[in-house]
Amino acid sequence: METGLKLKFVVVCALFLSSSCNSFQKKELSREQKMNQILKTIIPPTISKNKLIITDFGAVGDSLSDSKPAFDKVIQICKEQNGARIIVPPGVYLLRGPIHMVDNMSIDIQKGAKLIFSNEAKDYLPTVLTSWEGTFLYNYSPFIYAYQVKNVAIIGEGTIDGNAKDSFNLWHGKQKQSQELSRKMNHENVPIEKRQFGEGHFLRPQFIQFFECKNILIEGVTITNSPFWCVHFLKSENITARKVKFDAFNKNNDGFDPEYSKNVLIEDIDFNNADDNIAIKAGRDYEGRRIGLTSENIIIRNCRFKGLHGVVIGSEMSAGVQNVFVENCTYGGYCKRGIYLKSNPDRGGFIRDIYINNVVFGEVEDCFFVTSYYHGEGNGFETDIRNVFVDNLTCRSAANAGLVIQGYPTKKVRDIQFTNVKIDSCKTALSFTNVENIVFNDVVIGEAVKVPSSAK
């Protein structure tokens, strides 16, 4: 009998300890702990000590001579020598065609130097495998294109000029037919090798694209006059972008577009873009859901927003977006919307575990906006939007709305928490539809109400 009691006691203790251990292991990490874990995984590439000066290979910084042949030569040597730091000294260097990066290659555009690209579409042929608004296809080469390479960097205090204002920028009004064809091919799962665009079509190339790359650094440079999205991180990982300046006012001149990418640090950036400053994406519709490669572990901190929207998730996000941190950011000027999460029922996927902390905006149209019905279209694949934590968000003036959440009747936006939110003035304070479990802690929209007046 005594032995039986002892056995029961041991079993009970073991079960208790097991339960306690499991409970301890499942304890939720804080925002800071999650962010610090991600930061440990992001390590910029080492810049090669092998220096090659572009002018030694025939480049002339007179804004007239074609420096493309010189870049082709030096990139070949870089490949043969397993890496190099290609130095671009002061001057204006015209390139009649793209730069295709290789492993262990850095482009150091020094202060007073400018790379300016041809505005002739034929210079960016033959087509390359790329992506356009969330659909994989063959199109004109991005002006700087890194495909399946590792340890690459674009650094320096110089300028990269796409020279696209009076050329590619004008294609925006001609793109609709090809745009719709690309989406049709996506939905019908047309083999990618049959998705041939380029000549005869009007899909503008990205300016700088890292595609299936690892260990990326872009630092210090000024980016201007882009043909389409400025910097596209596509199916890439371990990315550091810092101290970049944007001066990009053409159509769809997003700043950074991480897509199907993970472990990304974007910090200390001066944005001035005609479109989204940062737009986090993860593929479009059927193709995005099929690929299923989540964009995740993205940290945005100490940036200054100016342009159309500050931080956007979507609208192409069908594989899902998670673990995004926006920390200690402010504004350099007007933004139409501050924080903008957008999807529609064509997308599917999810947006979850989004942390907004200590972010300040000045004048906006809408301060914080979530919609599951972007452009009022789509059906069959609602997006799951949940677990968004907004802490210390301040805005001086919202011409339209302070806080907006538009869920979908069959898939409500849920589990959103607002803490220490202050919006000084706005037309509409709150507009919430199809939402569930929205929590407010210390939220003031408009003038704070003080001690109530008493009867006289």
Image (cartoon, rainbow, N blue to C red):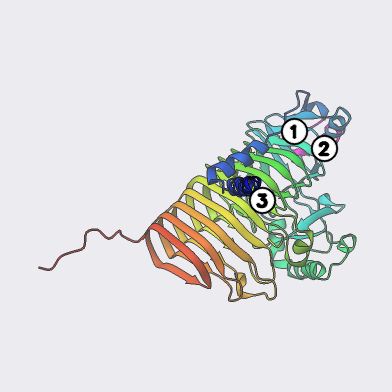
- Mark closer to the chain start, 3 or 2: 2
Residue count near mark 1 (Cα–Cα under 10 Å), binned few <14, some 14–19, many ≥20: many
For label 3, the residue is: 296
Label ID, residue 106: 1
Real-space Cα distance between discs 1 and 2?
A: 9 Å
Residue under the point 65% across and 56% down: 321
Q: Is residue 202 among the parts visible in the rendering? A: no
Q: In this picture, is 338 found above or below 96?
A: below
Estimate the x, y position of residue 205 in percent, counting from the top left.
75, 54
In which quadrant will I find the C terminus?
A: bottom left
For label 2, the residue is: 102
Amino acid type, label 2: Val
Highlighted range, magenta: 58-74
User: Mark 1 and 3 residues: CB-CB less than 8 Å, in contact?
Assistant: no
Image quarter of residue 245: top right
In this orientation, which residue lies closer to the viewer: 187 or 231?
187
Image quarter of residue 449: bottom left
Q: Does the stretch in magenta take in 70?
A: yes
| SS type, badge 2 | loop
Q: In this picture, is 65 found above or below 306?
A: above
Real-space Cα distance between discs 3 and 2?
A: 26 Å
- Mark in the foreground, 1 or 3: 3
Residue count near mark 3 (Cα–Cα under 10 Å), binned few <14, some 14–19, many ≥20: many
